[in-house]
Amino acid sequence: MAKLRTGLLAEIVTMAVDTLRTNKLRSALTVLGIVIGIMSIVGMTALIRGFDESLRDSIRELGPKTIFVAKFSGLSFMGGRDFLDLIRRPNLTLEDAHAIQRSAPTVRFVSVTYGGGIAARRERLSYRGNRTNAMAIIGTSSNFADANFIKLADGRFFTDTEVRGRRQVVVLGDSPAQALFRNVDPIGKKIRVGRDEYTVVGVLGKRPSPAGIGQGADDFVAIPHLTYQKKFGMEGFRIRGFLHRDVMLTVVPHDWASQADTIREVEQVMRARHGLRLDEENDFDLVTQDAALKVWEQFSRATLLALVAISSIALMVGGIGVMAIMTISVTERTREIGVRKAIGARRREILWQFLLEAVFLTSLGGLLGIVLGAGLGYTISRFSGFPVSLPWWSFAIGIGFSASVGIFFGLFPAFKAAKLDPIEALRYE
């Protein structure tokens, strides 16, 4: 029996290949929808997975116990909060940072950052003939590098004295340092940030970019926050009369303190400063590494499911094409079916013949879609720098989906062929 099935399978595959060979254009059009659907799944999965791994690496670069205090964050957006409600929240201030430092016993230190968000100030940097694109300018405390676990590649970070003195000193991210000082020691050099002159005192080490493209993790320069305030004021933007300023606090607990205790203390201080009643919810966000990873996992999973749903439409269209072409093929090969039945072929063998032909066609389209999808992902990565990752299961999904489409949409023409009466089939012209 097994021998018979093996022989039948080989015969059916041979017939399917012959059909493909004699009807190249029709076969190509039949599997086109499958190719597009699988190519979309594999290509987009490669890009989404690459972005996912890159972002997770960036989040893990943050301290496991570090707490970020912000007016609002991605957590609020993922929670479905209205943007205008978030803008109405009170802006964070330097006094908030001082209050946390003063009143929370488990806090080791607090770092303040101006201009790191959606209202970021951007300026071109120049040194002699070299210029950069517009870079984000952030105003920070002297402990910014320690708070964000960034290592110095060269020089030093600015001091508290330089912050209080509103000195025009700057620490470069890796990107502007590479753009301005290739093969030149940048320390002590004077650069232009917009129209003002600053002295370079340090260069930060390279960090993984959260997306690997565009405005990466190193595309910024840091200046003392009081210098930032002096030069740019506390500018932000207004929406319906409500002013938004980019101010974020980075809270680093003592080694001996638990993150939960520090979160509770920070929350108490901020709620007291904002005069919130017991029944009122927080009008600020507290973001931790675990919370950021959890939110990203939800978003990543939803994006992947949406991608599969969208690609399924292309696969369904491709499947309908397969069913239509296979039905036409059954009509065209009616006499062939009659001859096969006349010489002893059983109904189930005819059914398997056409069903496996459909599966063979869609699987072939699936394989082609996988190759093209992988090529698409790596091509986009090559020209854009976008990270890419191809998990093994994306190939399994590609083959599984394409074969399933062949089975589902091949059933109707296969049954139609199997039910043909041999005498009527032999009379068919």
Image (cartoon, rainbow, N blue to C red):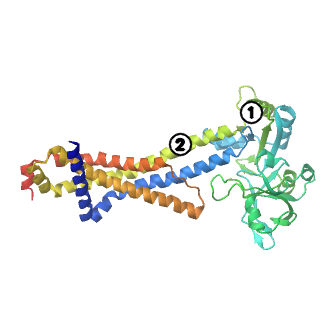
Q: Is residue 361 left or right of residue 236?
A: left
Give the camera-side residue of 35 and 12. 12
Report helix, strand or loop for mark 2: helix
Q: Which residue is mark 2?
A: 301
Residue at left offset 77%, top offset 42%: 250
Q: Nearer the viewer, mark 1 or mark 2?
A: 1
One can see residue 26 in this view:
yes
Left or right: residue 121 versus residue 81 is: right
Residue located beneath label 1 in the image: 259
Crowdedness near tag 1: few (<14), some (14–19) or many (≥20) residues, C-alpha within 10 Å? many
Which residue type carries mark 2?
A: Arg
Q: Quadrant of residue 384?
A: bottom right
Which residue is painted at 57% across and 52% down in the image? 50
Residue 198, labelled with which disc? none
- Contact (Cβ within 8 Å) of mark 1 with mark 2: no
Front one among 238 and 41: 41
Counting every numbered tag in the picture gives 2
Judge the density around disc 2: few (<14), some (14-19), many (≥20) Cα neighbours within 10 Å: few
Q: Estimate the x, y position of residue 67 in percent, counting from the top left.
A: 74, 39
